[in-house]
Image (cartoon, rainbow, N blue to C red):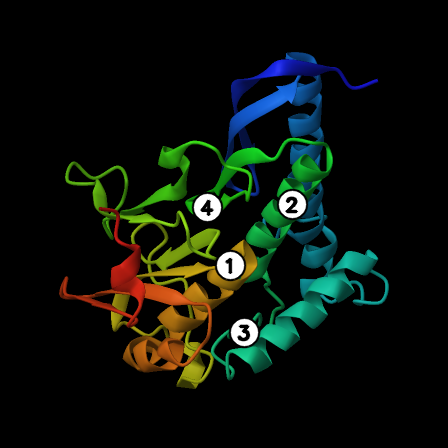
Amino acid sequence: MTEVSHQPKQFEHIELAMGTGFSFHGRSSLSDSDTSIVLNQACAILHEADRIFSLYKPESPLSRLARGETSVAACPPVVDEIWNACEQWEKTTDGWFSAFTSEHTFDPSGLVKTWAAERAAEYVLEQGITDFTLNAGGDIMISDGVTEAIDWRMGISKPISIAAPEAGVLTVVDLHRTTFRAMATSGSAERGNHIWNPKAVGLAPNQDFVQVSVIARDLVTADVWATAAFAEGERAIAHLNRIDDLEALFVYADGNLAATDGFINLFAK
């Protein structure tokens, strides 16, 4: 039986999974032991997604699919779910999000991390912990029940490696009293030019931007559009301005900034 304390207690849980760090931070009315159990079970969702979808694990279903050793139908049903989701997002983004590499390998990494993060967050909410944030390798989700003003604020990093001496915060946004609950950033600072242009010959990367941060109502939407906007390049500014419930900040290769029309309203004051 789950124990509920009268006074919410602060918690922080950091989990290494899917090649990155996931940080849960918030307040829980459950006992310390029950809170720990909930967070560990939520993180099991992340590890299961990694087991299935990692292309760095030779025996994962997705690695076997890439080598032609199996079919989507023979993989766990969630592979077909993600395949279909990627196809739908490709249509939604007018083809700027694609889950296929230049070698025609199915690589849904532009969606799977935040998809798994959302599933983990949903589990935490279902267990009665409603006041928390989740940082999924720099992509951030805020729960509706957040009670501390600081948790509504998100920092956008400078478009350089976090290991660089000049690394730090580029700007801060505040999502309090907005409909937005998530932000995702795509860029070349940590992994180089790893986002391909699905409409270019040879899927060569677009080099207009070094970083794109997208704010949306949910984490997957923010993540997919950040990837798509980076791939599209400068034309994405006008493109995202036509999309409801999205705002974005773009950092050009020369260091100049651009943003969608409503982004200015989100700067922390």
Q: Nearer the viewer, mark 2 or mark 1?
A: 1
Q: Position of residue 234 (x, y in %)?
A: 28, 78
Report the disc number at residue 140. Answer: 4
Provide the residue designation for mark 3. 98
The answer to whether residue 47 of the structure is visible from this angle is no
Q: Quadrant of the N terminus?
A: top right
Whichever of callouts 4 and 3 sits on the residue coming sooner in the sequence is 3
Residue 233 appears at what percent x and percent y?
32, 76
Give how far apart the Cα atoms at labels 2 and 1 are: 25 Å
Asked where in the image residue 43 lies, by quadrant, the reply is: top right
Dot 3: element = loop
Name the amino acid type tagged 3.
Answer: Ser
Query: Which residue, given by chain and number where applicable, does mark 1 sit on?
Result: 217
Q: Nearer the viewer, residue 239 or 158?
A: 239
Residue ID for mark 2: 50
Q: Secondary structure at mark 4?
A: strand
Give the distance between the C-alpha atoms of the residues marked 1 and 3, in whole angstroms: 21 Å
Q: Which circle's residue, 1 or 4, is located before the other in the chain?
A: 4
Q: Amino acid at mark 4?
A: Ile
186 is higher (above) or lower (below) than 196 = above
Q: Secondary structure at mark 2?
A: helix
